[in-house]
Image (cartoon, helix red, strand yellow):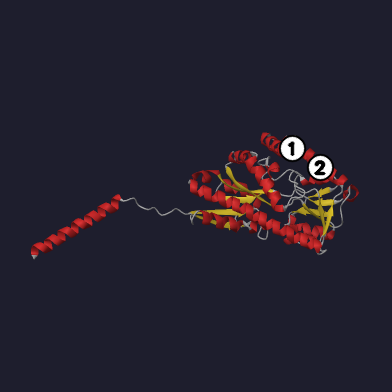
Amino acid sequence: MVRNEKLLVWVGRVSLSLVVALGLCLPQVAQAREYHLKIQSAYPRGDISMGALPIFAQSAEKRSNGQIKIKVYAEPEVVPGGQLFDAVKNRAVDMLQACGLYWNGIMPVDNVEVGPPMAFQFPGKSFQEQAKLVRDFYFKSGMIDLLRKEYAKRGLYLLDIHTYGPVPFVLARKPLKSLADFKGQKIRADGIDNEFHAGVGMHGAVIDGSEGYMALKLGTVDAAEWDLSAVSGMHWNEVAPYWIRGMENDQMIGHILINLDEWNSFPKEVQQALAGAGEDYWNATVNAYGKELQNIEALVKQGKLHEVWIDKDAHDAYWATAQKIWGELAKQDEASAQAIALVRKWRNLN
């Protein structure tokens, strides 16, 4: 009996040793690393593109099986919008969502990235068809590679692009159709659009978008440009009920940028998840701005907003000014010259 007990003890010890040894030899299943990232928009809450950013975060988490956790901020919840470029370079935030006009003083080709005046006009195409044409241009012409190369020089990686719909979206206090109508009118405009509108005799005014409503109401300006949020978010149509059409791009382009060193540190599967989320965000902005455009078109049908198409002489004057601006943009630097050449080739304007 004693022998049997000793045998059992010995067998138990041997078995335990084997289990421990096998456990040490078997490959260990590593717990998947989580990546906690921050993205800030250059726009405040209420902006259409900022409002779609949670879709980007949700998509990244889903595509990475929960590895990527992105916290979304609006301007100026981490830093003011104008400081985002440096904030991403310095890792105060990991990513930004904005448009190139914010950084054209740092990277001149950004004036082309957003879409040169009248370059993205596609009469007879639906909003979704227009968006596909523009996206195909960026990803199939070499434009996205050119832009990524320029951002890499500045420590950033261009993840993907998105749309803001038709820009400049111009609302006016009275109908503006002919060159005679435009002459001497004051317009709240941004950047090179001041020169663009000057081509039909208008005078640009530097006014913050947040002050646009009162400027229109008081007659400080006769017209103002923004994107579709001018109606849905700012309600400019209440004091400027005329939608001036014919000079705008059907799509204006923005981007998501991420710190380049951080991007390069991610394993391939994390990069793929973020890239897929970037494309999902593109689709989200196409859907959001497409829906908003439908809402605005409904206001036209209801007589609450009046659609005014510029006449041929005004259109020709805008086009001549656009071509002048394209030439000026091409002279900024080599990257800008290459970008304008790509646009010209795509639109068969060489």
Mark 2 crowd level (few <14, some 14–19, many ≥20, 10 Å Cα): some
Q: Going by the image, does 327 lie left or right of 61?
A: right
Does residue 266 appear in this view?
A: no
Label 1 to label 2: alpha-carbon separation: 15 Å
Q: Which amino acid, by three-letter code, is at mark 1?
A: Asn
Which label sits on residue 265?
A: none
Residue nearest the viewer, comparing 220 with 21 = 21
Residue 249, horizontal then vertical, whole percent: 75, 48
Q: Which quarter of the rendered picture does the N terminus lie within?
A: bottom left
Q: Residue at x 82, y 46 (%)?
A: 197
Could you tell which of marks 1 and 2 lies nearer the N-terminus?
Answer: 2
Q: Which amino acid, by three-letter code, is at mark 2?
A: Trp
Residue that carries the numbered disc 2 in the rendered image: 319
Q: Quadrant of residue 59?
A: bottom right
Q: Which quarter of the rendered picture does the C terminus lie within?
A: top right
Q: Residue at x 66, y 36 (%)?
A: 335
The label nearer to you, 1 versus 2, is: 1
- Tags 1 and 2 in contact by the CB under 8 Å rule? no
Secondary structure type for disc 1 = loop
Residue 211, horizontal then vertical, whole percent: 76, 57
Q: Going by the image, does 143 lie left or right of 246?
A: left
Q: Quadrant of residue 158?
A: top right
Q: Residue furthest bottom?
A: 1
Question: Height in image: 105 above or below 282?
Answer: above
Secondary structure type for disc 2 = helix
Question: Height in image: 91 above or below 339?
Answer: below
Residue that carries the numbered disc 1 in the rendered image: 348
Residue 268, horizontal then vertical, whole percent: 49, 46
Q: Going by the image, does 77 lie left or right of 7?
A: right
